[in-house]
Amino acid sequence: MSANVAVSLRGVLKEYQRADYSVRALDHITLDIASGQFFCLMGPSGSGKSTLLHLVAGIDRPTNGTVEVLGSAIGEMDDRSLARWRSQNIGYIFQSFNLVPVMTAAENVELPLLLTHLSKRERRERARSALEIVGLGDRLGHRPQQLSGGQEQRVAIARAIVTDPSIILADEPTGELDAQSATDVLTILKTLNANHDKTIIMVTHDPRARQYAKESRYLDKGKMTEMPEIQ
Amino acid sequence: MGKQLYLVLKNLRRNRRRTVLTVLSTAISVFLIGSLISVYAVFFDNEVREESALRLITRHRVSLTQALPYYYGARIAETDGVVRICPMNWFGGTYIDQRPEHMFPRFAVDQEAVFEMYPEFKAPPEQIEAFKRDRQGLAVGKTVADKLGFEIGQRITIKGDIYPFDPELTVRAIFEGPDDMQAFFHFKYLEEAVGPERGTEVGVFAIKLRSASDASRVAAAVDDMFRNSPVPTKTETEAAFQLSFINQLGNIKLFLLSIACAIMFSMLMVTANTVAMSVRERTREIGVLKTLGFQPGSVLGIVLSEAMLISLVGGALGILITVLVNQALSEVAVQFITGFRLPAWGVLACFATAILLSVGSSVIPATIAARTNIVDALRHTG
């Protein structure tokens, strides 16, 4: 694997076994994503985009093939090692934000730092910095229900970057947002890529998102295909 | 640990009403268990006092309801090791009415012997002398006197039920001591009133020993003395007698244990359901925590700790309620039962119950949460 390749998938097959049939979510995918890339993976629902993201994050394992991320063959790690590796190297942004409702914005952002040896003060400071990066330095004490959808997603982005991971995975980050909020979120992701040198892998339906990415690919029925003409 | 506690406290504040209700239900179940232990302690966990160790009780071998002849007393008194004997008859009867606040045990006793037999009952010597001199005198425990407002010189009438006789008594002595919830009047007064046939029947003989080490020998000697008579005896220590008296009510230990088990089981089900519901609601959040890098062991620890904290707080509250209720009961006394208390081992048992409840109710939901596949957890809706 080349030094500047952040993610490398080789012949990745992912099948889900059901009671009397199996579903092939990814069909022998081979893909390299360079470090510092803003990579956009598009495709219709059920095409396998999120599954690919899960494999890169190490929250799911391929049925066949290898997944290397930042030089580590994550398919060969045990669950404990994988969890530790993920906390240090991956920031994950969910479509539905998935903030903890009983925690403030700062506490939500601080959550991944509980896995580090940082002191409480250091954790608070880092959470504040992360929230300032996403433009929510004045919303530290707000709970998720006191924030708009766009603000919630920005808190989720702050949570993803607070541990300073090399790779940020974004699963439909604009899926539940209005146009303006979606633009804000995409702008933040682009800034993180350009100014903070984060490798960003985003899966999305949103055709506008493609404009923010440096590279886009299309996934359909578990296979990489040509990007269709998007109206 | 501190970081985990932080998450645990946050989660407990998620649904405050549910947390408070779960704490309260745990507190109530621990209170019920604590109350059962207190009842058990009253019956079976009393310390044998020094004076009590020097006493034996002789009764009819067949049943307490069968009487012994009065003359047995003289023969028992001749047994080596016996210092004093005191015939005692349960009089029963009604004071004013049948309401519990008017109930107190009344015994016809040998007025000359009773305060030597029970030296733990203390009264001013002139009162004891006045009680001995007055055939219709009544010596009453301070607890009863305080409760019913008895004063020295006050006349009261007891309506007889076991005996066809209504003693008219004058309070001559008010004694203090452990279990001072009873009253004594002259055996001779009863005998004269009901005639020689019933008047010479004795319920039990209290025997005072020279030494506690004589207990088994004297008990055997007394029972041997009357073994082949029409009225055989059973002689036992005061503690054993009290226990056999209690056992007439039935197998109290089994009864208490059964209730305790039923409470435990029902609370286990309720708490398990609450914990499972709480975990199920957070399935997606657990998936997020794992995505962030939390280990399955941490998730297990968080869920277990939540249940443990609820149970410990509920347990402490339950113990506090038990202690307060016991205090209130010890002041009013329930029927003739006194001395409600939660012994040290009872406090430990209550906490053990609370912990058992928490672990028992949360171990399965916590294990399921820890093992939940991240992708499945993130897809969870509900």
Image: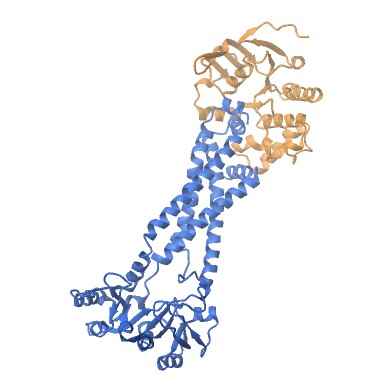
Chain colours: A orange, B blue
Q: Nearer the viewer, residue A190 or B380?
A: B380
Q: Visible in this render: residue B91? A: yes
Q: From what the image shows, is residue A132 above or below residue B145?
A: above
Q: Quadrant of the C terminus of chain B?
A: top right
Quadrant assignment, res A23: top right
Quadrant assignment, res B43: bottom left
Residue drawn at 54 percent across, 41 percent down: B273
Residue drawn at 53 percent across, 74 percent down: B101
x and y percentages locating residue B48 in the rendered image? 36, 72
Q: Visible in this render: residue B172? A: no
Residue drawn at 22 percent across, 82 percent down: B79
x and y percentages locating residue B285 in the rendered image? 62, 33
Which residue of the protein is positioned furthest toward the right in this rendering? A180
x and y percentages locating residue B126 in the rendered image? 45, 93
Q: Nearer the viewer, residue A114 or B210?
A: B210
Position of B352 compared to A35: left or right? Answer: left
Q: Nearer the viewer, residue B19 or A162?
A: B19
Q: From what the image shows, is residue B155 above or below residue A83?
A: below
Q: Quadrant of the N terminus of chain B?
A: top right
Which residue of the protein is positioned furthest toward the left in this rendering? B228
x and y percentages locating residue A228 in the rendered image? 71, 6
